[in-house]
Amino acid sequence: MNLLRLAGLFPLIVLTSQAATLFEDTFNRADNRNIDEVLTGITANTSPVLSADTVYSQPQLDPNNAAPTYGAQDADASNGGGAQIISNALQLAVGAGTSNAFINHNFVDASILSAGTFSISLEINAYAGTTTQQGGAFAIGMSLEEASATRDAWAVGSSDITQPSMTGAFNVNGTIGNPVPGPAGGVASDFWIALRGNGSVAWGGNTGNVMGKLVTAKTGTITVNFQFADVANFNAGTVVNYQVLYNLVEIGSGSFAWSGTNENYIGLDARDGTGVTMDNFKIATELVTPVGLPPSVTAFEATKLPGTLNTRFHWIVAEGTAGDPVSIEISDGTNVLHTSTDLTGFADVDASSATSFTLTASNETGDDGATTTFPVENSFSTAVRADTPAMWYRFCEATGSSLIVDSAPNAAPHEGSLVGAVVTGNASPLDKAASFPGTASILTDLIFDPAAQTQGFTIEAIVKRDLNSPADAAIISQNDGTGLGRSYLAVDSDGAIESFLAGGPGARKDADDTLDAETWVHLVMVVDTERSEMRWYLDGVEAGTTADSMNPDGSVFLTPFELEAADGNWRIGTQKSAATNFWLGSMDEVIVYQSLLDDVNGDGDTSDSHVAAHADAWLSSVSGLLGFSSSAQAITSNGQATLKVKVASDVTSVSINNGIGSLTPVNGYVTVNVSPSSTTTYTVTTTSPSGTQSQSITITFESAVVILTAVKGEYDFVITFQGQANTTYQANASIDLIDFTDDIADTTTDETGYGVMTIPSLPDTPEEFYQLQVRE
C-alpha cells in the first residue's frame, strides 16, 4: 500500500498501486483541424468505448473549423475561434474568438466511486495573452446538456443565459476574490480551474468567489486532486474536497458540492487572440503526489536605528508548500538576533557592532537564505536622520527586492511595494538609486493628512529626470482615501517644478526654476500651513514661492490656498490613481518630514533653515559625473545650444569631444555654447575616484524651411518649400499668430528636400496664418 499525506482538507489517504488511468490524451498525432479524427495519443479506459471522431464535442467552435470541412477559422470573434492538433499538442481559441471542447463520457465511473478519489492534470503551454482574460482551463461537474450549451469563455451567460461559459475564469470580473462572474447559471460547471496570462491560477464553481494564487508563470501544469468528503457518490449535494497543484506544488484546497446527480462531463476551455496550446490531459483515479517546496526569501534588508535597539530588520518570505509552517532566523553569523514565524515583518534588535546579517527561512522541505548589510552612511544620511523624517526611502535594496524599505526611525516602518517594474539597487553618485521606466510606481503604507499638520510638512528628493520625461511626472502623491489626494511634487516635461497640492481655481502651483534633464538634483518642497505658503528649493537655493500668487507662465492661483484633507496612501513615481503622470528617470532619495525643513522652529523666520545644509551634505557625499544637459535638442541654421555639465567636487578632469576639449568646472558646473551645422552627438568624459564616466547628448540640426510658392485654390492652399531631405513636415494654423492648431496637414519631402504641402481650405475659411515644421 502507498501512503500519501495531503494538506488542507485531505486526511491520510490509502491508495492502491493499481489505480487506473481513465482517460489520457497526449495529442501526439498528425496536425489536423479535426482534433479526434484518429485515436493516436488517446488512452480511454471508459465504457462505452470512445471511437475516432467521437472523443470530443466542441460546442464553441468557428463554423469554418467544424465538420464536415474542418477549414481555417474566419476572423469573426463572435462565432467562435478555431481548434487544431498542431506539433503534437492541442490548440484551442485559435485566431479570433474562443473555443472549448468536452469529452463524450460522463465520468461517474464505478472505479472513481471505488477509489473515492480522482485527479485531473493539464499542461497549459504557449499563448499570447498577458491578462486574467486569457489562458487555458478545465472544468468538471456538467451534465451533457450543460456542456453542450457552453459558449464564449468570456460571456458567462451575460448576454444569453441559455449559452453559459464552461468556466468563470476569463471574464473581466474574474479577479481573484471577486464573486464568480455572470448571472446565476452563467457558469455551467461545478468546479473549474484556469492558468491565466497574468501568471495566476484561478479556480471556482458556479457560485461563491473566484479563488486563486499568483504563481511564477502563465504556463505550466495545473492539477487537481478530488476526494469525496464522506460517502462516495455523484448525488446532488454530495461534498467533494479538492487540492490544487501548480507544477506539482500545492497552492490551495477547498470543497464544493455536486449541483446535479450523475453529472460529471469534463471539458477544456480557452481564450486568447492567437491560440492556447494544451498538452497531456489526464483523468485518473489515483491522486497526484505533491512535491514539497521550501520557503523563498524575496526581501531582506537592515536599517540603522538610534538607541540600544540599533538595528531594524525588514523581510518578506514566500511560504513554500501551502500550509507548511515556516521558521525564520536572523543572525550575525555568530549570534541569533531574532526568530519569527511571520512571513512578512520587521524587528528591532540590539545588533551591537555587527554590520552583516543572514536570514534563514525553513520548513519541512528545506530552507532558503539571504544576507544583507546596512546602506552606506554619509554626510547626507546623517543630516536626514538628525531631522527625524516621517518616511525615508533610500532605494538601496538588492536588485529584484520585492520590498521598498523605510529607513525612518519610527515605531513602525512605512514600507513600500512595487507596482510594476521599478528597479532598486542601481549605482548612483551618492549610494544606490531606483530606476523608474515611465510605467511603474511604488505604493507606500504612509498615511497622514496634509491638512491636519499644525506647522506643515516637507518633501525632500534627490532625482534625475529623463530627457523624454512626460508632462506632470509625479515624484510623490497621495491617494484620495476619504479626501482628495494630489500630486504633491511633480516635474513637467520642460523641467518645471510643480505642485498640485490644493483645490480650487489655479490648483497648479509652479516654482520659478526648472530641472535640467539627465542631471541629478537635490529638490525640496516645504508646505507651510500656518502661513499658507509653499516654498521650493533646488540644490539648496530657493527656487520659488507661492507668496507672489503667480506661476512663471503667467497663470495665477488663489492665495491663501486651500489645503485639502486626504487620508489615502502615499505613492512614489505616479499620480494618485497610478494610471498616468509616471516618473521617467531615477530617484536616489525620497523623504517626508512632518515639519518645516526651512523653518525648523516654525516661527516664520527661515534663518534656521536646514535646506542648504542638506544640499551641501549631499554635494559633499556624491562622486563623479552628476549630469550633462543641453538647452536645446534641435537647432536650425545659425542656432546655438548651451551644453551644461554638472560634477561632484572630486572630479579631476572634464572634457567634451568634437573639438571642445578640456574644461574647468566652476562651482561644480561647466557650460559651453555650440552651433553645429549638422546633427552632432556630444560626449562628456570625466575622471574622479569613481572612475572614468561618460554621458552623451545628440543635438539635431534642422535646415530652415524656405517657402518657394504659396497658391490659394478654391478648396485648398498649396505651399511648395525647400527643407530637409526625406523628412515629414506638418502644417499648423493660426488666426492671430499666438494660438496654433497643430498638424492640420502633412507631407514628406523628397531626396532633395523639396516638398508640397496641400492644406484644405474652403471658400468660407477665415484668413489664416500657416506654419511649417518638422513633424513632432
Image (cartoon, rainbow, N blue to C red):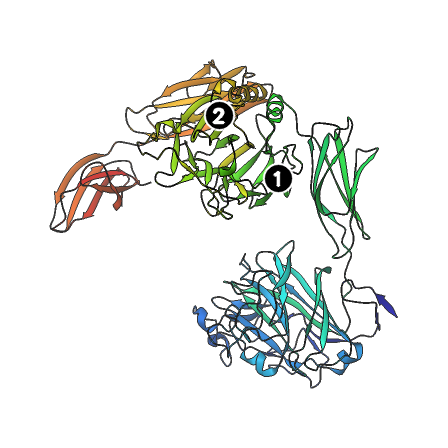
What amino acid does circle 2 point to? Answer: Gly
Name the residue nearer the viewer: 584 or 415. 415
Q: According to the image, label 2 marks what residue?
A: 627
Image height of 353 relative to 451, above or below: above
Q: Position of residue 532 (x, y in %)?
A: 43, 31
Image height of 572 relative to 133, above or below: above
Left or right, residue 47 beside residue 552: right
Left or right, residue 289 beside residue 505: right
Name, please, the residue furthest toward the right.
1
Name the residue nearer the viewer: 232 or 91. 232
Image height of 243 relative to 657, above or below: below
Q: Are there few (<14), some (14-19), or many (20+) residues within 10 Å of tag 2?
A: many
Q: Quadrant of the N terminus?
A: bottom right
Q: Position of residue 163 (x, y in %)?
A: 51, 77
Q: According to the image, label 1 marks what residue?
A: 414
Q: Secondary structure at mark 1?
A: loop
Q: Position of residue 688 (x, y in %)?
A: 57, 18
Please tell me in which quadrant of the rendered image residue 405 appears. Answer: top right
Query: In this rendering, which labeled residue sits more in front, label 2 or label 1?
Result: 1
Please tell me in which quadrant of the rendered image residue 555 appears. Answer: top left
Q: Position of residue 651 (x, y in %)?
A: 54, 17
Look at 18% across and 36% down and name the residue there.
707
Q: Quadrant of the C terminus?
A: top left
What amino acid does circle 1 point to? Answer: His
Q: Are there few (<14), some (14-19), or many (20+) residues within 10 Å of tag 1?
A: many
Name the residue nearer the viewer: 246 or 686. 246
Res. 71 visible in picture:
yes
Image height of 560 relative to 760, above or below: above
